[in-house]
Every structure is written in structure tokens, then in C-alpha cells.
């Protein structure tokens, strides 16, 4: 029986008008100025997309799989790869998330319209994985478990994360005055983390988080992905493409959220 996960954040976090959403996505993809390239794992028409997203509302020390069979978006639906879901379930390492937990979480949903748009015309299935508050040992374990999927060229991976959440409302106000304005200090802090992620070293990333406590919401999905790359036989290189802040903090009363995008390419 089909179990549908509704596009629960459409109409609030983003438009639920299919024509407007398609138009916006086309504009944003065009504005990125990025040409399609055959060595990007995501452009060789994969048949399966793994989504790794942090859990904002539901506490679990594990990773969780969806009970849904289809994820809806205003511009098209994405079926879940039930075969891979069953394969992962059989390891005994994954929880199953209820539909209300699934629909309350926004981290993976925000990627879905892009995936529908980019892979239009291809029979793509998805494997959503909600990544809980994992220990370092669990991050490494899930990385080892999922590494084999990196070696399959028909797989693509979409990892959801913001970067620094700065301000009193986020209870994080790290400020190194040597960088000048607060927003410059935030940028230096984020870029330090981005540089470490580009090295592909999950242990160095863990040390960075322990030392800075940077409020990167997708710290656990990123760590799992780094462990996946470390344990796969395919050499994949991460490169950051763009960095933005929601606003430029100049006083201790201000707040902002940082956003960084990266691509993981097969390193020939």
C-alpha cells in the first residue's frame, strides 16, 4: 500500500504553486552559473539519490529510515527505493521514523524540488536517511555501512546542512575580533570548517567542531558522508562552490545563518 509523505513545508517555507516553483528553480539554477559536467556524480543521470539530513525535532542516537513509499513535491513525486530501504533495515542499525516525524522535518524536503527539477525525465528513486545525534563511533559505523553505495556510479548523494547560526537566539556568539566585523569573524570560522571538509578527513572535522562548537546543523550528516568517502574505493573530492550569510552581523544584537554549497566529484 502506498504511503505518502506530503510536501508539508510547501506553502510556508517555499511556494506550493507548481508553475511558480518550477520558474524559481529554473532561475536559481541558471543564476548559479554552474555548467553541467560529466565528472560530477550527480549529472550522470543516477537512478538513486541518497538524502542525508539532520533531525531538528526528533531525538534519536541513530539514523532513521522513512516508512513512506513516496515523497510528494508541488512539481512531481519521488518514489522511495524500497529495495535499498529493506537492505538497510536488515542491518539492524536503523530506526524507522513515523510519518509525523518525517513530515515535521524540513532538512531533506528542501532538497526535493531541486532533485525533481534536475533529474526531470529520469526514473530516479530516493533513499531518505534522517541522521540523529550520533556519537563519533556511530558516525564512523554508518560511514562504513554506507560506503559501498558510493562505489556504485548510479548513486547520488544529497547532504543537507546550514552553517553557523550566530546570535543570542541561537545561544552562539563566538567573535574573534582579529577578523574585524562580526560577520567577517563568522565567515573565517565557517571557512575554516569548509577547508577541513574539503580535506575529506572526518577526524579533523570532529576536532574542529569540538574546538569551535560551530553551530553547523548538519554536522552529523556531513561527518557520516566524510566517513563514507574515506571507506569507499572510489576517490571523491569535495569542493565548496558558494558561501552566503542571511545577513551581515555588525553588533552583538544581530543574528544570522550561514549557507555553504559544495559538490563531491569523482577525482580521476
Image: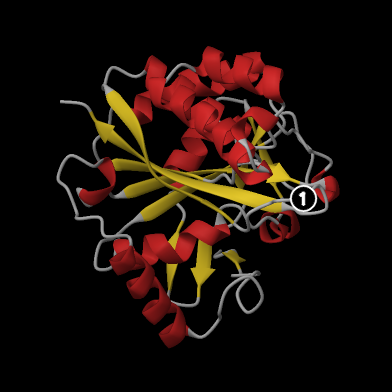
How many numbered circles does the render carry? 1
Q: Is residue 154 above or below residue 25?
A: above
183 or 262, nearer to the observer: 183
Q: Position of residue 65 (x, y in %)?
A: 60, 43
SS label for mark 1 = loop
| Nearest to the observer: residue 44 or residue 65 | 44
Quadrant of the frame with the C terminus = top left
Query: What residue is rendered at 52% in x and 27% in y?
Result: 192
Judged left or right of residue 221, residue 225 is left
Q: Residue at x 21, y 26 (%)?
A: 267
Res. 121 image quadrant: bottom left
Is residue 89 at least partly visible in the picture? no
Residue 197: % across, % down: 46, 26
Q: How is the image coloured?
A: secondary structure
From what the image shows, is residue 120 above or below residue 195?
A: below
For the residue pair 234 and 161, the one nearer the viewer reads as 161
Drawn side of residue 258 relative to residue 256, left or right? left
Q: Which quarter of the figure is the N terminus placed in?
A: bottom right
Q: Residue at x 19, y 48 (%)?
A: 44
Is there any visible trace of residue 98 in the rendered image?
Answer: yes
Locate residue 139, reporting x and y percent: 59, 21
Residue 127 percent across, percent down from the top left: 47, 46
Q: In screen coordinates, is 68 left or right of 177?
A: left
Dot 1, crowdedness within 10 Å: few (<14), some or many (≥20)? few
Q: Which residue is mark 1?
A: 251
Amino acid at each position: 500500500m502506498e504511503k505518502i509523505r506530503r510536501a508539508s513545508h510547501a506553502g510556508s517555507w517555499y511556494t506550493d504553486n507548481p508553475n511558480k516553483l518550477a520558474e524559481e528553480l529554473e532561475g536559481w539554477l541558471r543564476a548559479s552559473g554552474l555548467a553541467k559536467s560529466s565528472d560530477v556524480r550527480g549529472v550522470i543521470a543516477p537512478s538513486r539519490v541518497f538524502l542525508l539530513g539532520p533531525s531538528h525535532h526528533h531525538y534519536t542516537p541513530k539514523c532513521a529510515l522513512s516508512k513512506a513509499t513516496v515523497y510528494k513535491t508541488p512539481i512531481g513525486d519521488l518514489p522511495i527505493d524500497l529495495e535499498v530501504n529493506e537492505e538497510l533495515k536488515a542491518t539492524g542499525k536503523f530506526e524507522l521514523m513515523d510519518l509525523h516525524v518525517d513530515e515535521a522535518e524540513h532538512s531533506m524536503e528542501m532538497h526535493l524540488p531541486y532533485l525533481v527539477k534536475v533529474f526531470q525525465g529520469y526514473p530516479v528513486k530516493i533513499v531518505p536517511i534522517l541522521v540523529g545525534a550520533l556519537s563519533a563511533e556511530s558516525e564512523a559505523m554508518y560511514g562504513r555501512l554506507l560506503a559501498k553505495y558510493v562505489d556504485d556510479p548510479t548513486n547520488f548523494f544529497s547532504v543537507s546542512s546550514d552553517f553557523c547560526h550566530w546570535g543570542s537566539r541561537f545561544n552562539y556568539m563566538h567573535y574573534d575580533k582579529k577578523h574585524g566585523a562580526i560577520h567577517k569573524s563568522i565567515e573565517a570560522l565557517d571557512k575554516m570548517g569548509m577547508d577541513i571538509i574539503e580535506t575529506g578527513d572526518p577526524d579533523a572535522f570532529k576536532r574542529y567542531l569540538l574546538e569551535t562548537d560551530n553551530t553547523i546543523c548538519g554536522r552529523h550528516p556531513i561527518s557520516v558522508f566524510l566517513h563514507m568517502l574515506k571507506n569507499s574505493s572510489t576517490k571523491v573530492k569535495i569542493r565548496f562552490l558558494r558561501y552566503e550569510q542571511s545577513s551581515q552581523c555588525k553588533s552583538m544584537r544581530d543574528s544570522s545563518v550561514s549557507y555553504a554549497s559544495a559538490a563531491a566529484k569523482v577525482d580521476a
